[in-house]
């Protein structure tokens, strides 16, 4: 380079630097006096004259360069918010013989760049279902699987008059009272030993409910001393006898209940509720835990929640949510037992609440207790306790479940968008499954090799993933229905469905397939409990997602065969006396009927495509009719390429009928693997800003007001 030119450039740079250095703002006092200001806070002149407190600077309005596209984005967001806040709401009450609720509103289909903060399933008002003229309406929780089934059926029928199906398959109050009046007696010692062994084996490995060795020693002591009248011991062992009968008998006709063990359960309940203890002992809490869990076998979910609430409050009264000083409770077995009983109460509180869509009864911030651990010597630990790492994993999963209900299914106000909250929950679930100890991981190669508590833990994990992602899957289904089945290529070149929505939908489908695989394997090999609640519940939840999967491009038409298989398994469980399976089978049977009609209507609409008629895909959304933009389909229809060959109704069959092995039909793909998918990794890596600007689900919930709680029925 020419030396003269280099010198000129250097001089220009120095001049530019000097000009920049002189560009500071004077404080208001120096500016008024037209004197030089140092630019400090406070400046040197104000300090010198003792006016440091008055040294203030006028706000600067700097000029910055931004891209025009960013300004356009801000302007469009401003217009959307103005239209949303200023739009008129036309309310029209609609009535129906079965339900009442909020009125419907009229709204246009939203743009996918919303920044709303609500769940697409939650409205402003709670959902109540009339049950009987003499009884108050029943509250329907937003997270309940039966409520989700109702939303799906409303989408399929295109009618918001499709009624919710109330739960009637449970042991009635008068059955419990009659069984209690029979005053069932203690069994023989041999029978008592057998029933307690069955109960401890079946439920003792899944939850910490009692001390194993101490329980058997107490049973022997009762029969040796003849102390059969101690009320609290009688309640505890009668509750254990109820579990023993439920896992070893097929029916109990004497009590009028379909579930064995009802007589022992009823007697234990009657005795326990006679006197509320002012000074709680740990055996009382053990009994409440047992009775709460057995209530699910009777499909009495409300009773189960009330019982665990009583246990929670009794525990709080004695400070069980705090560590107790070792000097005040020296026995390591009693200390560890106290700690584990509290964490079991905590697990039940979170899990029971998630089944019903009700809030947790204690905040995590109010618990100051260590996690379960082992005690020395190891032999003493093994005699009384189960694996502490398993219980710790269960506690951590229950914590995520509680956060899921609070962040996605409540009406609390959050500054984060819906997708931001979903992302944080999925990150927590991903971390949970990745940090599991090796001996707690699922053996996918041989599902039957997994112990019962391991299978139970992973089914709970899958259900939590489904709870977190299924609102988005239903949103995806409605969007595709309203837009002719296309996932991209609107008239303006933008996507109809954004990638995060597809990613969350895929994760939901993977979790459902995995749960279906586990449960079906246990059913085929005869290891599925006859009267248990949770396998029936998880199968029902998975079946709903699999039915939805058969209609979306990211799913598989073969999932409809898995849906049918799940329906048949629930039918068989129902016929064998499982009350929960009976409830879920009835719900799923109605879904099947709606599927049949939906397919017939789609075929008719395809024949009448030129007429311009549209289906009301927004019927499942709640208040608000949606006028959908319908682009030219570009990626296949909502039913998928195999629609004609699958059928809905008598033509669709099991996985075997359509030439697919069970593992392949259900995916052969664990839920943990779904977190390793590139699209999921991208979603979890997105910043809050990216999700806040993208947020493809949130307008859907803001403008339509509700998906679960649309009650203009």
Image (tube, rainbow, N blue to C red):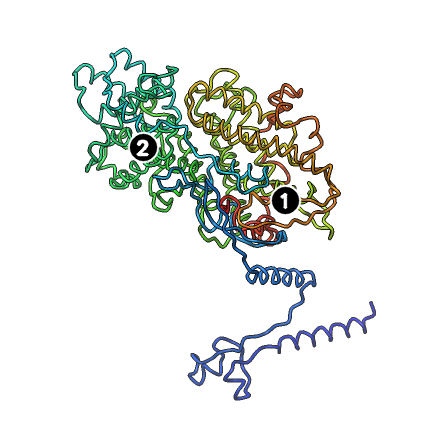
422 and 623: which one is in front? 623
Residue 51 against residue 205 in the figure, above or below:
below
For label 2, count other residues whose C-alpha is less than 10 Å away and answer few (under 14), some (14-19) or many (20+): many
- Contact between marks 2 and 1 (CB within 8 A): the answer is no
Place of residue 132 in the rendered image (x, y in percent of width and height, measured from the top left): 38, 37
Mark 1: few, some, or many residues within 10 Å (few <14, many ≥20)? many
> Residue 74 at what x, y percent from top left?
63, 62
Question: Residue 486 location in percent, x, y?
Answer: 70, 42
Task: Determine the image quadrant of residue 652.
Answer: top right
Left or right: residue 592 versus residue 452 is right
Say what secondary structure mark 2 lies in. Answer: helix
Residue 670 percent coordinates (x, y): 57, 29
Residue 653's image quarter?
A: top right
Tell whether 318 sits left or right of 367: left
> Would you say 669 lies left or right of 175 here?
right
Quadrant of the drawing holding the N terminus:
bottom right
Which numbered dot is residue 34? none
In this view of the protein, which residue sits in the foreground, 63 or 18?
Answer: 63
In this figure, which residue is indicated by the disc labeled 2?
341
Q: Nearer the viewer, residue 307 or 448?
A: 307
For marks 2 and 1, the one nearer the N-term is 2
Q: Rounded to the nearest whole Å, what is the CA distance between mark 2 and mark 1?
A: 46 Å
Mark 2 vs mark 1: in front: 1
How many dots with numbers?
Answer: 2
Residue that protrudes farthest toward the right in the picture: 2
Farthest residue to the bottom: give it. Answer: 33
- For label 1, the residue is 479
SS of the residue under disc 1: helix
């Amino acid at each position: 380079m020419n030396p003269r030119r280099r010198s000129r450039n250097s001089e220009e740079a120095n001049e530019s630097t000097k000009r920049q250095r002189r560009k500071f703002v004077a404080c208001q006092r120096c500016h008024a006096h037209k004197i030089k200001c140092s630019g400090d806070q406070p400046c040197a002149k104000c300090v010198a004259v003792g006016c440091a407190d008055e040294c203030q600077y006028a706000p600067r309005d700097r000029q910055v360069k931004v891209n025009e596209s960013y300004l356009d984005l801000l302007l469009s967001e401003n217009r959307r918010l103005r239209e949303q806040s200023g739009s008129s709401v036309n309310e029209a009450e609609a009535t129906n013989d079965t339900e009442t609720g909020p009125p419907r509103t009229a709204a246009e289909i939203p743009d996918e760049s919303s920044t709303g903060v609500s769940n697409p399933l939650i409205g402003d008002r709670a959902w109540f279902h009339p049950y009987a003229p003499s009884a108050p309406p029943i509250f329907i929780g937003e997270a309940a699987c039966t409520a989700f089934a109702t939303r799906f059926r409303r989408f399929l029928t295109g009618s918001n008059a499709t009624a919710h199906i109330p739960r009637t398959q449970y042991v009635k109050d008068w059955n419990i009272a009659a069984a209690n009046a029979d005053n069932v007696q203690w069994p023989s010692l041999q029978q008592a030993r057998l029933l307690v062994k069955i109960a401890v084996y079946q439920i003792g490995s899944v939850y910490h409910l009692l001390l194993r060795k101490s329980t058997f020693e107490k049973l022997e002591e009762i029969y040796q001393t003849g102390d059969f009248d101690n009320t609290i011991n009688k309640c505890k062992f009668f509750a254990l006898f109820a579990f023993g009968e439920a896992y070893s008998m097929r029916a109990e006709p004497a009590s009028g209940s379909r579930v064995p063990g009802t007589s022992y359960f009823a007697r234990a309940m009657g005795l326990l509720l006679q006197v509320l203890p002012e000074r709680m002992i740990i055996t009382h809490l053990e009994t409440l835990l047992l009775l709460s869990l057995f209530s699910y076998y009777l499909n009495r979910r409300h009773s189960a929640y009330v019982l665990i609430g009583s246990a929670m409050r009794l525990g709080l009264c004695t400070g069980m949510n705090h560590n107790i000083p070792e000097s005040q409770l020296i026995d390591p077995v009693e200390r560890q037992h106290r700690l584990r009983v509290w964490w079991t109460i905590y697990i039940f509180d979170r899990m029971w609440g998630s089944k019903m869509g009700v809030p947790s009864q204690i905040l995590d911030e109010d618990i100051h207790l260590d996690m379960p651990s082992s005690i020395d010597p190891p032999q003493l630990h093994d005699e009384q306790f189960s694996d502490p790492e398993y219980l710790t994993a269960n506690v951590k999963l229950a914590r995520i479940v509680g956060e899921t209900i609070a962040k996605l299914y409540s009406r609390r106000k959050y500054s984060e968008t819906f997708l931001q909250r979903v992302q944080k929950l999925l990150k927590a679930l991903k971390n949970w499954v990745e940090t599991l100890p090796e001996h707690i991981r699922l053996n996918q190669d041989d599902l039957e090799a997994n112990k019962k508590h391991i299978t139970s833990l992973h089914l709970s994990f899958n259900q939590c993933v489904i709870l977190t992602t299924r609102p988005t899957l239903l949103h995806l289904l409605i969007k595709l229905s309203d837009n002719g089945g296309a996932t991209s290529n609107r008239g303006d070149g933008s996507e109809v469905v954004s990638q995060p929505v597809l990613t969350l939908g895929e994760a939901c489908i993977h979790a459902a397939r995995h749960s279906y695989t586990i449960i079906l394997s246990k059913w085929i090999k005869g290891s599925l409990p006859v009267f248990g609640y949770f396998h029936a519940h998880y199968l029902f939840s998975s079946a709903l997602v699999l039915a939805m999967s058969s209609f979306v491009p990211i799913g598989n038409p073969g999932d409809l065969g898995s849906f049918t298989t799940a329906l048949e398994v629930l039918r068989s469980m129902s016929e064998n006396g499982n009350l929960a399976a009976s409830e879920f089978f009835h719900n799923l049977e109605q879904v099947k009927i709606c599927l049949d009609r939906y397919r017939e209507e789609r075929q008719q609409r395809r024949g009448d495509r030129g007429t311009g008629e549209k289906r009301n895909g927004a019927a499942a959304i709640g208040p608000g009719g949606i006028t959908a933009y319908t682009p030219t389909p570009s990626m296949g229809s909502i039913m998928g390429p195999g629609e004609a060959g699958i059928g809905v109704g008598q033509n669709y069959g099991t996985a075997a009928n359509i030439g697919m092995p069970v593992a392949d039909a259900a995916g052969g793909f664990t839920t943990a693997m779904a977190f390793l998918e590139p699209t999921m990794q991208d979603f979890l890596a997105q910043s809050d800003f990216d999700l806040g600007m993208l947020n493809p689900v949130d307008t859907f919930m803001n403008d339509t007001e509700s998906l679960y709680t649309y009650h203009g029925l």
